[in-house]
Every structure is written in C-alpha cells, then in structure tokens.
Image (cartoon, rainbow, N blue to C red):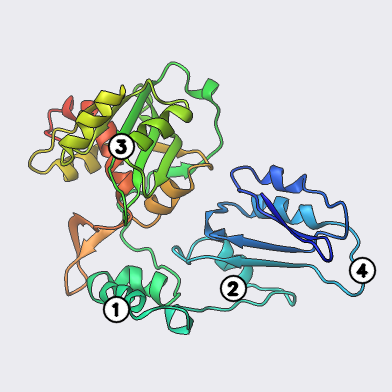
Amino acid sequence: MEMTYKPTGQKIYFRGLDDPLKVTSITTEIGVLCWMWIEEAYEITSENDFDTLCESMLGDCPDYLFKQITLTFNPWNEHHWLKKKFFDNPDEDTLAITTNYLCNEWLSDDDKKVFEKMKVKNPRRYAVAGLGGWGIVDGLVFENWEEKQFTLDDVRGFKTKCGLDFGYTNDPTAVPIMFLDKANETLYIWDELYQTGLSNKKIYQTLTDMGYGKERYTGDSAEPKSIDELKGYGLRIKGAKKGKDSIQNGIQYIQDLKIIIHPRCTSFLTEIQNYTWEKDKFGNKLKIPIDDFNHLMDAMRYGLEDEIINKDWMF
C-alpha cells in the first residue's frame, strides 16, 4: 500500500516486516527514500534484521533533506537489543525519548481509566505499557528456549502439535504451530496465529489460508460452543482435558523440553520472555504463573496435551 501527495509526488510506502528483505527492495521514481517509521519495533527480534532495514535507505541525500529512522514500541524486556543499542550505548546521532499515556493529549477519560485500572490490577504491565519503563524480567517460567532459524526439512518426520486459545476483543486468538521431536525432547515453534477480532469462521479461514487447515488442534475447553462451531467448518479440533494441577503439570512437562523458536514467531517470543511466576505481597515467587503474556503459552500446553497425559498426569 502507498499514499501519494499529488502536488509534489511525495509518497508514503506501507510495508509489513515479516521479511526485512522485502523492504530493502523499495525504490522511488522521484526523490529519495529518507524517512522510515517502524511501529512495534520490539517485534524486530535481532539487530541484524534492523541493519537490513537500514540498508533500504542507503544512497545520496540532497542537502535540503536528511535521513531519519523513527522506532516506536513498548519496552517489554530489558534484555532486548533495542535497549542496549539505543538507550544504554547510544551514539551521537540517536535521540531516545520515553513517553507514556500521561503525555497523550488525545486520550479520552475512558482511555485513561484503562491505565488506571491496569495500575491496580496489573502493576507489572502498567510499569511498561502505562509508564514506559523497561520490563524487568525476574522468575521466568520457561528459560529452556532459544530463537533459531530452521526449515521444514529440519522437522520433517516429527509430530505436528497445534493448540488454540480463544480470544476476541481484548485478548488475541492464539495458535502456535509446533513440531515435537520426542526422541531428543525438543519442541520446535514453527509458526503462529495471534490476532484479535477473529470470529470462529475467520479463525478457520485464517488457519486454512496459512496452510494449517488440515492439522489437528486442541483448544480451550472453556469454549465448547466455539469448538463445536469450528468442527462444523471442518477444523479437526477437540477440547483440552483440564484437571487438578493441569497448568503446573503442563508447565513441568514443557520445562523438561528444549524449545526452538523460529524468528518469525514474534508474539511467541514476546510472551515467553515475559511469562513469569506470580509473587505474593512480600515479593516471594508463587507456583502460579501470572495471568498475562499467557495466550500462546496456554495454547502450547493444550497442543501438547496428549504427551502430558502420557506422563501419567492429568492436564
């Protein structure tokens, strides 16, 4: 998609960042590509990918213009490369500004109430999304993972595992597409669906368009009507068999695996880097995960239900 200012011919190009190389191929018929705005820059998971984006702006620039890249994001994890590059060790050409909802004059009173409620109910999220502070990760539930490129040839012959956590307005529908290498106790996260506003019909259509319409799914059993509706569309899905200590048992099983996450799975990476244990009022960790950053984490457990049950645990 692009927009053109007709009096001058100036253009704004809109591109997705599923593949940074797609952006480097942008050329202009008139003028110079000299300004880039990257929204949700946190989803650029490596500095190398960012450098690839910067290459799209290489070339001479007239004296009356200047090159500029603007990045906007919520700073969920203090260990992200963005913090090290632009905040901890900025060069002379970097301007880093922290803003928050208190600076936004366009928010309505209802918008502000969202953050005030967040301040009380979820202070950890409020510190990041509300006040713009860097997320301090302490007590991660899963530390047995790495981000790594791999191909379908690398996982050929392994069991496909798919889970589904329902969402709609505020929470996303979350689906990880996974491969389990049981012999080597390794779980590969290959792809993901992570989107709000999806009806059950749209969930089926989207998964089909992604090429996963024929896979077997295990979904949140708290949504039996949705599961039945998806079955009616042709999706092979069943409800998860939840029971006592199902979350803890599922987590324990996954903690014994090695998790390899494909870089395209940016939402999965965000969740697993922020999925921590709950704390009591004294700051002591509880054996209960936080009720946040858990949509894909829950769906991962659902997708592995058969393996967990085979460990003589009730999911």
Labelled pair 2, 3 in contact (Cβ < 8 Å): no
| Secondary structure of the residue carrying numbered label 3 | helix
The crowding category of the residue bearing disc 4, from other C-alpha atoms within 10 Å (few below 14, some 14 to 19, many at least 20), is: few
The crowding category of the residue bearing disc 1, from other C-alpha atoms within 10 Å (few below 14, some 14 to 19, many at least 20), is: some
| Secondary structure of the residue carrying numbered label 2 | helix
The numbered dot on residue 62 is: 4
> Distance between the Cα atoms at labels 2 and 3?
42 Å
Q: Residue under label 3, please give it.
A: 200
| Secondary structure of the residue carrying numbered label 1 | helix
Q: Earlier in the sequence, mark 2 or mark 1?
A: 2
Q: Residue furthest left?
A: 244
Q: Residue at x 85, y 72 (%)?
A: 65
Q: Residue under label 2, please give it.
A: 87
Residue 236 shows in this picture:
no
The numbered dot on residue 116 is: 1
Labelled pair 2, 1 in contact (Cβ < 8 Å): no
Q: Position of residue 34 (x, y in %)?
A: 79, 63
> Distance between the Cα atoms at labels 3 and 4?
52 Å
> Distance between the Cα atoms at labels 4 and 1?
47 Å
> Distance between the Cα atoms at labels 2 and 1?
27 Å
Q: Earlier in the sequence, mark 3 or mark 4?
A: 4
Residue type at mark 2?
Answer: Phe
| Secondary structure of the residue carrying numbered label 4 | loop
Q: Earlier in the sequence, mark 4 or mark 1?
A: 4
Q: Relative to 172, is 94 above or below? A: below
Q: Relative to 17, is 233 above or below? A: above
Residue type at mark 3?
Answer: Asn
The numbered dot on residue 292 is: none
Labelled pair 4, 1 in contact (Cβ < 8 Å): no
Q: Earlier in the sequence, mark 1 or mark 3?
A: 1
Pick the residue in front: 117 or 94.
Answer: 117
